[in-house]
Image: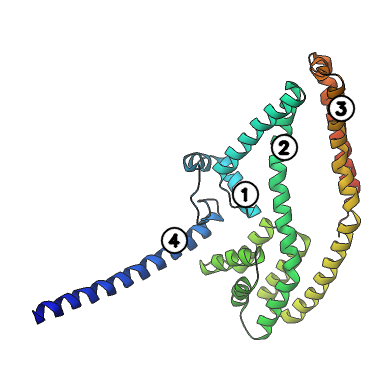
Amino acid sequence: MDNLTLLTVGVTLLACVLGVAGAHVYSSGRAQRQALVARMSQTGQTPLPTGRRQRFAGLDRRLRATRAGRRLEREITATGLDLTAGEYTVYVATTLLALYFTIGAVFAPFFGLLAAVAGLWGARSFLRWQRARRTEAFINQLPELTRVLANATQAGLALRTALAMAADELDDPAGYELSVVADQLALGQSIDDALGVLADRLPSRELIVLVTTLILANRAGGQVVTSLRNLTQTLEERKETRREVTTMLSQIKVTALAVPLLGLGFLLMINTMTPGALDKMTGSVTGQIATVTAFGLYALGAVLIRRFSRIQV
Protein backbone atom coordinates (compact mmCIF):
# COMPACT_ATOMS: atom_id res chain seq x y z
CA MET A 1 0.00 0.00 0.00
CA ASP A 2 2.83 2.40 0.88
CA ASN A 3 4.55 1.62 -2.42
CA LEU A 4 1.29 2.28 -4.30
CA THR A 5 0.89 5.64 -2.54
CA LEU A 6 4.45 6.67 -3.29
CA LEU A 7 4.03 5.58 -6.91
CA THR A 8 0.83 7.61 -7.24
CA VAL A 9 2.47 10.69 -5.74
CA GLY A 10 5.49 10.26 -8.00
CA VAL A 11 3.38 9.89 -11.12
CA THR A 12 1.32 12.94 -10.13
CA LEU A 13 4.43 15.07 -9.57
CA LEU A 14 5.88 13.89 -12.86
CA ALA A 15 2.66 14.76 -14.65
CA CYS A 16 2.70 18.23 -13.07
CA VAL A 17 6.30 18.80 -14.10
CA LEU A 18 5.60 17.65 -17.65
CA GLY A 19 2.50 19.85 -17.76
CA VAL A 20 4.45 22.93 -16.67
CA ALA A 21 7.23 22.14 -19.12
CA GLY A 22 4.72 21.64 -21.92
CA ALA A 23 2.97 24.94 -21.16
CA HIS A 24 6.33 26.71 -21.17
CA VAL A 25 7.33 25.17 -24.50
CA TYR A 26 3.93 26.01 -25.98
CA SER A 27 4.05 29.65 -24.84
CA SER A 28 7.62 30.16 -26.06
CA GLY A 29 6.83 28.53 -29.40
CA ARG A 30 3.72 30.66 -29.82
CA ALA A 31 5.72 33.81 -29.06
CA GLN A 32 8.39 32.82 -31.57
CA ARG A 33 5.74 32.12 -34.19
CA GLN A 34 4.10 35.49 -33.64
CA ALA A 35 7.47 37.23 -33.90
CA LEU A 36 8.25 35.35 -37.12
CA VAL A 37 4.87 36.19 -38.64
CA ALA A 38 5.32 39.84 -37.65
CA ARG A 39 8.66 39.94 -39.46
CA MET A 40 7.28 38.20 -42.54
CA SER A 41 4.30 40.55 -42.65
CA GLN A 42 6.62 43.43 -43.45
CA THR A 43 7.42 41.80 -46.79
CA GLY A 44 3.78 41.05 -47.56
CA GLN A 45 4.14 37.30 -47.19
CA THR A 46 1.58 36.79 -44.44
CA PRO A 47 -0.89 38.89 -42.45
CA LEU A 48 0.10 40.42 -39.16
CA PRO A 49 -1.22 38.45 -36.17
CA THR A 50 -3.62 40.44 -34.06
CA GLY A 51 -4.70 37.97 -31.40
CA ARG A 52 -8.23 37.81 -32.80
CA ARG A 53 -9.99 35.51 -35.20
CA GLN A 54 -9.55 36.81 -38.73
CA ARG A 55 -12.64 36.95 -40.89
CA PHE A 56 -12.89 36.01 -44.57
CA ALA A 57 -9.67 33.99 -44.47
CA GLY A 58 -10.41 32.27 -47.76
CA LEU A 59 -10.87 35.55 -49.62
CA ASP A 60 -7.75 36.91 -47.96
CA ARG A 61 -5.68 33.97 -49.20
CA ARG A 62 -6.96 34.46 -52.74
CA LEU A 63 -6.18 38.17 -52.63
CA ARG A 64 -2.66 37.61 -51.31
CA ALA A 65 -2.06 35.31 -54.27
CA THR A 66 -2.43 38.29 -56.63
CA ARG A 67 -0.15 41.27 -57.13
CA ALA A 68 -2.93 43.77 -56.40
CA GLY A 69 -3.82 41.93 -53.19
CA ARG A 70 -0.23 41.96 -51.96
CA ARG A 71 0.05 45.67 -52.73
CA LEU A 72 -3.20 46.30 -50.85
CA GLU A 73 -1.91 44.32 -47.89
CA ARG A 74 1.29 46.38 -47.77
CA GLU A 75 -0.77 49.58 -47.83
CA ILE A 76 -2.95 48.36 -44.98
CA THR A 77 0.12 47.31 -42.98
CA ALA A 78 1.59 50.81 -43.41
CA THR A 79 -1.57 52.33 -41.91
CA GLY A 80 -1.37 50.26 -38.72
CA LEU A 81 -5.00 49.16 -39.03
CA ASP A 82 -6.09 45.85 -37.51
CA LEU A 83 -7.40 44.60 -40.85
CA THR A 84 -6.53 42.05 -43.49
CA ALA A 85 -6.88 42.57 -47.22
CA GLY A 86 -9.92 40.28 -47.31
CA GLU A 87 -11.67 42.11 -44.49
CA TYR A 88 -10.95 45.48 -46.08
CA THR A 89 -12.33 44.32 -49.44
CA VAL A 90 -15.55 42.95 -47.91
CA TYR A 91 -16.10 46.05 -45.78
CA VAL A 92 -15.56 48.36 -48.76
CA ALA A 93 -17.92 46.33 -50.96
CA THR A 94 -20.59 46.38 -48.25
CA THR A 95 -20.21 50.13 -47.80
CA LEU A 96 -20.47 50.76 -51.53
CA LEU A 97 -23.70 48.76 -51.75
CA ALA A 98 -25.11 50.63 -48.74
CA LEU A 99 -24.21 53.96 -50.33
CA TYR A 100 -25.77 52.98 -53.64
CA PHE A 101 -29.11 51.95 -52.20
CA THR A 102 -29.28 54.69 -49.55
CA ILE A 103 -28.34 57.63 -51.77
CA GLY A 104 -30.40 56.20 -54.61
CA ALA A 105 -33.46 56.03 -52.37
CA VAL A 106 -32.99 59.55 -50.95
CA PHE A 107 -32.06 61.35 -54.17
CA ALA A 108 -32.22 59.29 -57.38
CA PRO A 109 -30.73 55.99 -58.67
CA PHE A 110 -28.15 57.88 -60.74
CA PHE A 111 -26.90 59.64 -57.60
CA GLY A 112 -26.53 56.24 -55.97
CA LEU A 113 -24.13 55.24 -58.74
CA LEU A 114 -22.16 58.47 -58.26
CA ALA A 115 -22.07 57.83 -54.52
CA ALA A 116 -20.67 54.33 -55.09
CA VAL A 117 -17.91 55.73 -57.32
CA ALA A 118 -17.15 58.42 -54.75
CA GLY A 119 -17.13 55.77 -52.02
CA LEU A 120 -14.57 53.71 -53.96
CA TRP A 121 -12.34 56.78 -54.21
CA GLY A 122 -12.97 57.51 -50.54
CA ALA A 123 -11.89 53.99 -49.54
CA ARG A 124 -8.50 54.53 -51.18
CA SER A 125 -8.28 58.02 -49.72
CA PHE A 126 -9.00 56.60 -46.27
CA LEU A 127 -5.91 54.39 -46.49
CA ARG A 128 -3.78 57.34 -47.56
CA TRP A 129 -5.25 59.49 -44.79
CA GLN A 130 -4.65 56.79 -42.19
CA ARG A 131 -1.08 56.35 -43.37
CA ALA A 132 -0.52 60.13 -43.25
CA ARG A 133 -2.03 60.21 -39.77
CA ARG A 134 0.29 57.44 -38.60
CA THR A 135 3.24 59.22 -40.19
CA GLU A 136 2.25 62.44 -38.42
CA ALA A 137 2.08 60.62 -35.10
CA PHE A 138 5.51 59.14 -35.75
CA ILE A 139 6.91 62.59 -36.60
CA ASN A 140 5.59 63.93 -33.30
CA GLN A 141 7.58 61.21 -31.51
CA LEU A 142 10.82 61.95 -33.36
CA PRO A 143 12.16 64.45 -30.79
CA GLU A 144 11.72 61.88 -28.04
CA LEU A 145 13.24 59.20 -30.28
CA THR A 146 16.34 61.24 -31.03
CA ARG A 147 16.69 62.05 -27.32
CA VAL A 148 16.61 58.35 -26.43
CA LEU A 149 19.13 57.51 -29.16
CA ALA A 150 21.43 60.33 -28.06
CA ASN A 151 21.34 59.18 -24.43
CA ALA A 152 21.97 55.57 -25.43
CA THR A 153 24.89 56.36 -27.72
CA GLN A 154 26.37 58.72 -25.15
CA ALA A 155 26.26 55.84 -22.66
CA GLY A 156 28.43 53.83 -25.05
CA LEU A 157 25.75 51.58 -26.57
CA ALA A 158 25.92 50.51 -30.19
CA LEU A 159 23.38 51.93 -32.64
CA ARG A 160 21.66 48.54 -33.00
CA THR A 161 21.24 48.29 -29.23
CA ALA A 162 20.07 51.90 -29.02
CA LEU A 163 17.36 51.25 -31.64
CA ALA A 164 16.17 48.15 -29.79
CA MET A 165 16.07 50.07 -26.50
CA ALA A 166 14.10 52.90 -28.12
CA ALA A 167 11.62 50.34 -29.46
CA ASP A 168 11.00 49.11 -25.91
CA GLU A 169 10.66 52.58 -24.37
CA LEU A 170 8.53 54.41 -26.94
CA ASP A 171 4.82 54.01 -27.54
CA ASP A 172 3.21 53.17 -30.86
CA PRO A 173 3.65 53.91 -33.68
CA ALA A 174 7.35 54.65 -33.06
CA GLY A 175 7.76 51.67 -30.75
CA TYR A 176 6.25 49.25 -33.25
CA GLU A 177 8.16 50.63 -36.24
CA LEU A 178 11.47 50.51 -34.37
CA SER A 179 10.73 46.98 -33.21
CA VAL A 180 10.36 46.03 -36.89
CA VAL A 181 13.74 47.63 -37.58
CA ALA A 182 15.26 45.78 -34.61
CA ASP A 183 13.83 42.48 -35.87
CA GLN A 184 15.26 43.10 -39.33
CA LEU A 185 18.67 43.84 -37.81
CA ALA A 186 18.44 40.64 -35.76
CA LEU A 187 17.81 38.72 -38.99
CA GLY A 188 21.08 40.02 -40.42
CA GLN A 189 19.87 42.98 -42.45
CA SER A 190 22.17 46.00 -42.54
CA ILE A 191 21.35 49.22 -40.70
CA ASP A 192 21.25 51.14 -43.98
CA ASP A 193 18.65 48.82 -45.50
CA ALA A 194 16.51 48.54 -42.36
CA LEU A 195 16.37 52.32 -41.86
CA GLY A 196 15.80 52.84 -45.58
CA VAL A 197 12.74 50.57 -45.47
CA LEU A 198 11.47 52.56 -42.48
CA ALA A 199 11.86 55.83 -44.40
CA ASP A 200 9.98 54.35 -47.37
CA ARG A 201 7.19 53.04 -45.14
CA LEU A 202 6.67 56.39 -43.36
CA PRO A 203 7.85 59.07 -45.78
CA SER A 204 8.58 62.47 -44.21
CA ARG A 205 11.33 65.07 -44.31
CA GLU A 206 12.08 64.78 -40.63
CA LEU A 207 12.47 61.01 -40.75
CA ILE A 208 14.67 61.21 -43.85
CA VAL A 209 16.97 63.64 -42.01
CA LEU A 210 17.15 61.33 -38.99
CA VAL A 211 17.77 58.24 -41.13
CA THR A 212 20.47 60.04 -43.11
CA THR A 213 22.16 61.18 -39.89
CA LEU A 214 22.15 57.66 -38.44
CA ILE A 215 23.41 56.07 -41.66
CA LEU A 216 26.27 58.56 -42.02
CA ALA A 217 27.18 58.15 -38.37
CA ASN A 218 27.17 54.38 -38.75
CA ARG A 219 29.39 54.52 -41.84
CA ALA A 220 31.89 57.22 -40.92
CA GLY A 221 31.53 57.60 -37.16
CA GLY A 222 31.95 61.11 -35.75
CA GLN A 223 30.02 63.20 -33.29
CA VAL A 224 26.77 61.26 -33.46
CA VAL A 225 25.70 62.39 -29.98
CA THR A 226 26.14 66.06 -30.84
CA SER A 227 24.29 65.59 -34.12
CA LEU A 228 21.38 63.89 -32.37
CA ARG A 229 21.24 66.62 -29.72
CA ASN A 230 21.07 69.33 -32.37
CA LEU A 231 18.53 67.32 -34.36
CA THR A 232 16.36 66.92 -31.26
CA GLN A 233 16.20 70.69 -30.77
CA THR A 234 15.43 71.26 -34.44
CA LEU A 235 12.65 68.67 -34.43
CA GLU A 236 11.11 70.26 -31.33
CA GLU A 237 10.99 73.62 -33.08
CA ARG A 238 9.52 72.10 -36.25
CA LYS A 239 6.91 70.28 -34.17
CA GLU A 240 5.71 73.54 -32.64
CA THR A 241 5.70 75.26 -36.03
CA ARG A 242 3.66 72.46 -37.60
CA ARG A 243 1.17 72.67 -34.73
CA GLU A 244 0.72 76.41 -35.24
CA VAL A 245 0.28 76.02 -38.99
CA THR A 246 -2.31 73.27 -38.50
CA THR A 247 -4.29 75.48 -36.13
CA MET A 248 -4.22 78.40 -38.54
CA LEU A 249 -5.42 76.28 -41.47
CA SER A 250 -8.22 74.47 -39.65
CA GLN A 251 -10.88 76.92 -40.89
CA ILE A 252 -9.74 76.49 -44.50
CA LYS A 253 -9.97 72.70 -44.19
CA VAL A 254 -13.53 73.01 -42.90
CA THR A 255 -14.36 75.24 -45.88
CA ALA A 256 -12.98 72.67 -48.31
CA LEU A 257 -15.26 70.07 -46.74
CA ALA A 258 -18.29 72.36 -46.63
CA VAL A 259 -18.18 73.21 -50.35
CA PRO A 260 -19.33 69.79 -51.67
CA LEU A 261 -21.72 69.34 -48.74
CA LEU A 262 -23.51 72.54 -49.75
CA GLY A 263 -24.15 71.09 -53.19
CA LEU A 264 -25.69 67.96 -51.70
CA GLY A 265 -27.80 70.12 -49.40
CA PHE A 266 -29.16 72.12 -52.33
CA LEU A 267 -30.06 68.93 -54.19
CA LEU A 268 -31.86 67.55 -51.16
CA MET A 269 -33.76 70.81 -50.76
CA ILE A 270 -34.81 70.78 -54.41
CA ASN A 271 -35.99 67.18 -54.20
CA THR A 272 -37.94 67.97 -51.02
CA MET A 273 -39.66 71.02 -52.52
CA THR A 274 -40.40 69.25 -55.82
CA PRO A 275 -40.60 65.46 -55.36
CA GLY A 276 -39.29 63.55 -58.35
CA ALA A 277 -37.31 66.52 -59.73
CA LEU A 278 -34.00 64.71 -59.47
CA ASP A 279 -35.40 61.64 -61.22
CA LYS A 280 -36.50 63.83 -64.13
CA MET A 281 -33.16 65.67 -64.16
CA THR A 282 -31.10 62.50 -64.34
CA GLY A 283 -33.54 60.70 -66.64
CA SER A 284 -31.79 62.02 -69.76
CA VAL A 285 -28.19 61.90 -70.95
CA THR A 286 -27.97 65.68 -70.88
CA GLY A 287 -29.07 65.81 -67.27
CA GLN A 288 -26.62 63.10 -66.29
CA ILE A 289 -23.74 64.93 -68.00
CA ALA A 290 -24.73 68.17 -66.28
CA THR A 291 -24.91 66.40 -62.91
CA VAL A 292 -21.47 64.80 -63.33
CA THR A 293 -20.04 68.15 -64.44
CA ALA A 294 -21.52 69.93 -61.41
CA PHE A 295 -20.14 67.36 -58.99
CA GLY A 296 -16.78 67.53 -60.74
CA LEU A 297 -16.69 71.31 -60.30
CA TYR A 298 -17.55 70.97 -56.60
CA ALA A 299 -14.79 68.40 -56.18
CA LEU A 300 -12.35 70.60 -58.11
CA GLY A 301 -13.19 73.55 -55.87
CA ALA A 302 -12.53 71.50 -52.74
CA VAL A 303 -9.22 70.21 -54.14
CA LEU A 304 -8.08 73.72 -55.16
CA ILE A 305 -8.89 75.11 -51.72
CA ARG A 306 -6.78 72.41 -50.07
CA ARG A 307 -3.97 72.85 -52.60
CA PHE A 308 -3.77 76.61 -52.11
CA SER A 309 -3.84 76.24 -48.33
CA ARG A 310 -1.12 73.57 -48.19
CA ILE A 311 2.01 74.85 -46.51
CA GLN A 312 5.12 72.71 -46.39
CA VAL A 313 6.95 73.17 -43.09
Q: Are marks 2 and 1 in contact (CB under 8 Å)?
A: no
Closer-to-camera residue (151/185): 151
Distance, label 3 to label 1, CA atoms, is: 39 Å
Closer-to-camera residue (58/214): 58
Left or right, 137 with reference to 175: right
Residue at screen point 86% across, 19% down: 274
Distance, label 2 to label 4, CA atoms, is: 37 Å
Residue assigned mark 4: 33
Amino acid on which the number 3 mark rests in the picture = Met
Q: Secondary structure at mark 3?
A: helix
Question: Could you say which quadrant of the image residue 105 lies in?
Answer: top right
Q: Position of residue 310 (x, y in %)?
A: 87, 51
Left or right, 32 with reference to 136: left
Q: Position of residue 224 (x, y in %)?
A: 72, 79
Distance, label 1 to label 4, CA atoms, is: 21 Å
Residue assigned mark 3: 269
Q: Secondary structure at mark 4?
A: helix
Mark closer to the observer (3, 1): 3
Crowdedness of circle 1 by 10 Å Cα count: few (<14), some, many (20+)? many
Residue at screen point 53% across, 56% down: 50
Q: Earlier in the sequence, mark 3 or mark 1?
A: 1
Q: Earlier in the sequence, mark 3 or mark 2?
A: 2
Picture disc at residue 121: 2
Closer-to-camera residue (163/99): 99
Picture disc at residue 241: none
Q: Earlier in the sequence, mark 2 or mark 4?
A: 4
